Image (cartoon, rainbow, N blue to C red):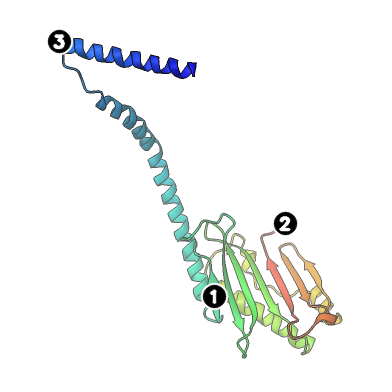
Amino acid sequence: MVILKIEEVFFANINDRKAEAILVATLLGYKIPSTSKYYLACISIPIMVLIVSFIPSYIQDYNIMSKQQAIIANSIDKISDSLYEECDYVYSDDPYEYYDEYGYYISGYLSDENGDDYAYVSVTINSEGLINGINYSIDVDVNVSKEDNLALLQSTLTTLNSLLNEADVKAIEDELLTNYQLSDDFIEWFETSSYYDEENFYESNMMISYYSTPLEEYDDYGISYVYVSIYPENYY
């Protein structure tokens, strides 16, 4: 309460001195300048300094971002158009909706005569519009021979890879767009193993994995498929 009283007295004294100064100036015929323009200057000058300092940097960053988005969108459009030549539908991220430093995805899906998806390719595009990763997934039919499945696996890889090459989008490494063949180790394992086993095979820039629902759980919803991941050398 004492502090509040002191503050009241302090500001009252200031107001009294201001009123006295105005009275004296008026009696002597002096014009009292308006203080509003000084208040305006105190507010506007710092704002102008901020604008001059940061707006050019913001515009530059915006222009760089817009250029990156256009480059990424061009790569996505080219890959999507190429995939649509064989794929039943294509999904792709939109770089104009958001920025993702980890990349943008385009996926194309192949369907069988019944309209069921049996294979897809997923491509990752980096912030420079370059391909930096490719994943293939192809279903395996446990009701047909190993030879037929191997033939379908390789032909599907070749088909999807050809579509990516036709898109004419560069990769961060040329090897990413190579028409990969199933490795001898994978083929030997696949031919001699059960459809319901699982295994992984690694190379310098490639991983081939086989996944399957266990035999004892396999029903109409059981799945078996080969997953091929191609990435830059020494990626991991």
Which residue position holds label 2?
236
Q: In terms of depth relative to the viewer, which is nearer, 219 or 11?
A: 11
Residue at image x 16%, y 16%?
Answer: 31
Residue lying furthest front: 1
Disc 1, SS: strand
Counting residues from the start of the chain, the first of labels 1 and 3 encountered is 3
Q: Amino acid at mark 3?
A: Leu
**Residue 210, above or below 26:** below
Tell me: 191 left or right of 100. Answer: right
Crowding at label 3, few (<14), some or many (≥20) Cα neighbours within 10 Å?
few
Which residue position holds label 3?
27
The quarter of the picture where the C terminus appears is: bottom right
Tell me: 122 left or right of 209. Answer: left
Residue at image x 79%, y 68%?
Answer: 201
Where residue 156 sits, quadrant-wise, is: bottom right
- Depth-wise, is mark 3 or mark 2 nearer the camera? 3
| Residue 47 point in image, percent of width and height | 36, 34
Q: Amino acid at mark 1?
A: Val
Crowding at label 2, few (<14), some or many (≥20) Cα neighbours within 10 Å?
few
**Residue 206, above or below 16:** below
- Depth-wise, is mark 1 or mark 2 nearer the camera? 1
Counting residues from the start of the chain, the first of labels 1 and 2 encountered is 1
- Depth-wise, is mark 1 or mark 3 nearer the camera? 3
Label annotation for residue 90: 1
Q: In terms of depth relative to the viewer, which is nearer, 128 or 177?
A: 128
